[in-house]
Amino acid sequence: MAKDSDPRLNHLLAALPEAEWQRWAPQLEWVAMPLGQVLYESGLTLSHAYFPITSIVSLLYVMENGASAEIAVVGKEGLVGISLFMGGGSTPSRGVVQSAGEGFRMRASLMMEEFNRAGPAMHLLLRYTQALITQMAQTAVCNRHHSLDQQLCRWLLLSLDRLSGNELVMTQELIGNMLGVRREGVTESALKLQKAGLIRYARGHITVLDRPALERRTCECYAVVKLEYDRLLPAKPAI
């Protein structure tokens, strides 16, 4: 990945007014985000806020026995590290790169300083936080009330929205860890989608072949989350 990538491929950074962007730009550091990298651990103070551009980060809750479940995904639409400016400093979740790529990061102290200016950036970050909370709440409802097939469709669609293509590099074991289910269950659901012609799965690569059909097959949770992001955040980067 080229280190001359444009930070404003991240939608939040692209939405900053020019005065804020001129302050932020010199403070942003390019970072590679390889598959499986842990950006922060449960209970630890975050050192940076991360702005993905071609990667996806999964926010996970991990139980004492090691079992985990995903509560949200973050990609080019947002940032990882809302606890920095929400006043908590740390969070009981874990941030793990679920789809490799690149991004930018800003030191925690600078992020807090920018938020405390109480200007346009603060309002943008708060709107993003509301959208992220909606995703977390809807994920909890979905995991309780909807089938694994529907959950997998929702997860695939949310992940695709955060990438520029139609392919995910992801093992079924990792998907199972994200959804909090056994690998066998994911295999069965993925095979159903593949048999129906919606996806192609081979060697960790999931290619979506029929997105409209995938949207028809999922539960209402995907649309609820997408509508809230569209309502609260800029639709496209302003570049």
Image: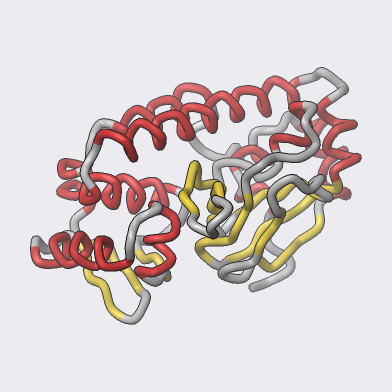
Q: Nearer the viewer, residue 5 or 51?
A: 51
* Image: 11 above or below 210: above
- Could you tell me which residue is drawn at 66 percent across and 42 percent down? 92
Q: Is residue 84 left or right of residue 212?
A: right
* Image: 119 above or below 94: above
Q: How many marks?
A: 0
Residue 140 lies, in percent from the top left, at 41, 34
Residue 154 lies, in percent from the top left, at 31, 45
Q: Is residue 168 left or right of residue 93?
A: left
- Could you tell me which residue is drawn at 64 percent across and 63 percent down? 102
Picture quarter with the C terminus:
top right
Q: Quadrant of residue 181?
A: bottom left
- Could you tell me which residue is drawn at 37 percent across and 76 percent down? 204
Residue 215 lies, in percent from the top left, at 22, 43
Colouring style: secondary structure
- Could you tell me which residue is drawn at 13 percent across and 62 percent down? 192
Picture quarter with the N terminus:
bottom right
Residue 41 lies, in percent from the top left, at 70, 54
* Image: 117 above or below 214: above
Q: Nearer the viewer, residue 43 or 2?
A: 43
Q: Quadrant of residue 143?
A: top left
Q: Is residue 211 left or right of residue 116?
A: left
Q: Nearer the viewer, residue 1 or 218?
A: 218
